[in-house]
Amino acid sequence: MIALINWLETRTGVKALMHEAFNERVPGGARWRYVWGSTLVFTFVLQMITGFMLWSAYSPSTRTAWESVYHIQHEMFLGNIIRGLHHYAAQGMVVLMAIHLIQVIIDGAYKAPREVNFWLGIVLMMIVLGLSLTGYLLPWDQKGYYATQVTTNIMSATPVVGREVQVLAQGGSDYGHLTLTRFFAMHAGILPTLLVGFLVLHIYVFRRHGLTVHDPKRAPDTTFWPDQVLKDSVACLAVLAVVLLLAMFRAPELSAPADPAVKFDAARPEWYFLFLFRFLKFHAVESLGVTFGAIIVPGIIMGIIAAMPITAKVLGNLGHTLNRAFTWALALGVVVLTLMAFYEDANNVEHQAALTEAHRDGQRAIELSTGPDKIPVEGAVTLLREDPFTHGPRLFAQHCSSCHRFNGHDGRGSLVTEAGKTDEAPSVIAAPTAADLGGFGNRQWMTAIVMDYSNHFAWMKNSTWFRDAQAKHAAGGTVDYINPDSSEMADWTSGNLDALKSADNADNVKALVEFLAAETGHAGTTYDAALVEKGRDLAIKGSWAGALNGTSCASCHDTIGQDFPTQPDDSTASSYPTLAKYASLAWLKDFIRHPDAARHYGAKNQMVVYSSQKLSDENLDLLVRWMTNDYTASTVHDYQDQLEVLKASLASNASGVAAPKGNK
Amino acid sequence: MTSTSPEIPAAGSVDLPISVETPRRSLLVQLITGMLSFLIIAVPSTLSGLFFLDPILRKRKAVSDDTADGEVPRKDEAGFIRLDVTKEAVPQDGTPLSVTVNDDLVDAWNMFRDVPVGSIWLRKVGDGPILAFNSICPHLGCSVDYIREENEFYCPCHASAFALDGKKMNDIPPRDLDVLEVSMRTHGQQDANGHEIWVKFQNFQRATSDKIVI
Ligand code: FES
């Protein structure tokens, strides 16, 4: 062993090198406060190790980036841990860097003769920020995509060369394959190489001047090895433990694949840039423009920091005091702004809803990718684009939610609001003016139609057309309108309620409901075939017990039990709405396109007619398939039911709002 | 301020032994320090090493086929794949016919439906059974051609030659051409007189004298 070392020594001088590295003098004894630089080097090494691993499985293109990151995290052995380590160590590096910088300034370690090393440190800091910025885009998910858009657009606000800088960074005028290949080359090649180079210089110059020691008399001098190394490794171990635990128990999120056509309302930068984000939102800052807030101000701050050694030199102790005061003020400002941003987001209903949706979309993308069909070559983004579970709610919110609700919300989990009575008044929760379509066509829905018709459609009574019609009616006019309280259907259910509720008909009602629900053909429910047949008999022949006997659905709705025609027309329409496969995919599509057709509501119709100009065939398909459960089943946490919340807030706010009583 | 640092000699000049008052730490401390330093690098390295071994360590999940209801799947449980050509297409005179084999291909996160996964040589002598060879050369994996003039299979890479029955004709290849199992069927059902050609398409380890499925 000794011989080997000597052999090496004569050829490489390794012993002297080791000696120099490990016997570095630590005046005043080893201290915990010297560990920060070492933890930074350690996290960088950790990033190199995990980064090379991710590199071995990452594929930078707009059709494979998200997909390969998905593959790493959800398919590969320990992939979630490797990505988690890299994700959290990156954030750890920023935090450690901030601590290191503050300490250097507080301790005066930036002053002569260490100015150059201070500047080297600032260059390193820029490189690390560049690494985190480029890394954020690489998964090509909605979160990274939209956050990075903001950054590259800020770049474009740079005076004079802004546009060119942006195009260079993006590899073109828009985001695409080349944006990813360039960001990846920056992230995994150019910036790390620069970082290693500057780090070597930084450490070399540091060794030249040694530690900045306050009181060398505090304890006897010691050497780097083992005293300081022990403290350093304990600190590094703590860093490792934290990032490992986070990676294990709080896997980094992979939001939905980037889609320029799908808005991402939850966009935020990485949390350590939130302060800047919040700063830009101040009205005063906003009014001065992006260039001022995002480039000039940060530029001035960096300039002040870089000039600190000069300030201290010129102004002496006063300069140092000023520098320290500036640092503390800056740190305080960053902390306050960050907390403000967090606090405001936490209390921002819309942002929380957007976060919920982002989460839902992301989980859904992963769920679909995990399926036995894997991911199509066109990319996972098409999985979502063609997914009713993802786009149905958005289409509902866009087209239907001005009148209808879905379990009390707008389809996307939010309550619908309208402007307050006056300009200054805050917006208020809007009352629905048409049926709540949550659970459309299921057993409860059918039960409500049969037993509780007026109440079930009570929301309609909030509409202007209903009130107008009632007013006209009260004034003695004749109006033909849909009245949930008074119509042949309403009269049938209320007039026969006792009979319907009688013990003799209990099974019959159950059977009829089973039949009606089965006719919808909605996926995800199994129906009792015998009960369905019994229900069909009731619907068509009216084989009820007691006073109801002989009253069948078919005597008015003559097409009940039939298939919904592929080319529906009004040639055989009666004056009653068709119930042929009521609430099925085919029925609903036709209804949305032609609610005013004689086979549906005819002249009484109040619903907007959705022609293909208003709602394309593709979108109609997505919307209707969502409403009829025609999509790959999901275990993703869906939007919360808001019906009770809606009812409660309507009851407390407004007077005279009609709402169905009881639970649905 | 009090924090002005005293001038410290550059590290290069600290060659003198550590001053007597500096306590030499016990072996134990050195040992612990060494172990900790090792640990902080060993943990991420080990995790990374295991991640890198993913192709060996991970179990593959089952994937679906997209056969429509009522249709005979293109591939059966035993791995036989229906070719696009039928018995009639194979020349009667024993001339080999090159055929592309299509299958669903799983590539990491992607699934490619019904894409070429390889090519084979089909051959029939008179009314005898149809023979199928994988066209990959058992030497080092180039693809084997049919040379009409010589009436033999020939690999342009290192000059392996095979007779039309697949037997190697020189000592370059380590074994004969790889014969694939063939099954004649009608609507996917075994039938010696059937017209559909089903082949159990497999690739084999190159450069070994044994035929090992990969
Ligand atoms: S690969 Fe065919 S002869 Fe070498």
Image (cartoon, coloured by chain):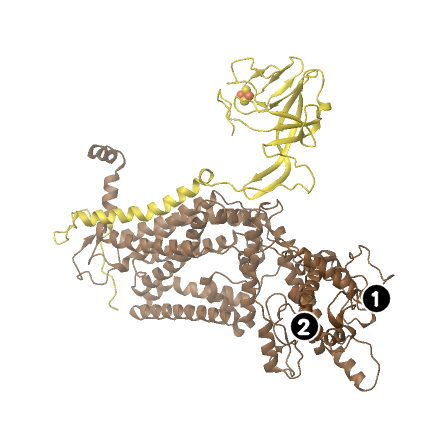
Chain colours: A brown, B yellow
Question: Residue A598 has which mark?
Answer: 1
Dot 2 amino acid type: Lys
Quarter of the rendering containing residue A435: bottom right
- Do callouts 2 and 1 point to residues on the same chain? yes
Is the residue under label 1 in contact with that under label 2 (CB below 8 Å)? no
Badge 1 density bin: few <14, some 14–19, many ≥20, Cα 10 Å: many
In the rendered structure, the answer to whether residue A58 lies left or right of residue A539 reads left
Location of residue A527 with respect to A658 vertically, above or below: above
Marked residue chain, label 1: A
The one of A129 and A616 positioned closer to us in this rendering: A616
Residue highlighted by disc 2: A501
Dot 1 amino acid type: Ala
Name the residue at 62% across, 58% down: A390
Q: Is mark 1 within 8 Å of ligand 1?
A: no
Q: Quadrant of the C terminus of chain A?
A: bottom right
Quarter of the rendering containing residue A586: bottom right
Q: Position of residue A644 (x, y in %)?
A: 58, 73
The one of A507 and A132 positioned closer to us in this rendering: A507
Q: Position of residue A176 (x, y in %)?
A: 60, 50
